[in-house]
Amino acid sequence: MLPKLLSDRVHYVNYFRMSPETFEHLLSLVGPSLIRVNTTMRKCLSPSERLAVTLRFLASGKLLN
């Protein structure tokens, strides 16, 4: 989902309610706190994916669609 958003700036801003530059700045601030370790049962979401899901939920009140 994220790669498709990155190709269209207008859609990205409408989706997250912030510019890609602001997203990257926010990710640089909170990214280290969002890092998790993969286990044998599952692979973890990347910090950018975790932030994207959180921002989408906060912006719209629903999960990614």
Image: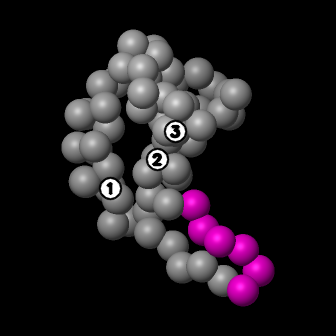
Q: How busy is the neighbourhood of tag 2: few (under 14 within 10 Å), some, or many (20 plus)?
A: some
- Say what amino acid the circle numbered 2 marks: Leu
**Residue 3 in the figure: left or right of residue 27:** right
Which residue shows up at 50% across the image and 60% down it?
A: 46
The x and y percentages for residue 47 are: 45, 58
**Residue 35 in the figure: left or right of residue 28:** right
Which residue shows up at 59% across the image and 37% down it?
A: 1
Q: Nearer the viewer, mark 2 or mark 3?
A: 3
The x and y percentages for residue 60 are: 58, 21
Residue ID for mark 2:
51
- Numbered disc 1: secondary structure: helix
- Say what amino acid the circle numbered 1 marks: Val
Is 23 above or below relative to 44?
above
- Span of residues in magenta: 40-45
Which residue shows up at 42% across the image and 27% down it?
A: 7
First reached walking from the N terminus: tag 1 or tag 2: 1
Residue ID for mark 3:
2
> How far separated are the C-alphas under marks 2 and 3?
11 Å
Q: Nearer the viewer, mark 1 or mark 3?
A: 3
Residue 30 - label: 1
> How far separated are the C-alphas under marks 1 and 2?
9 Å
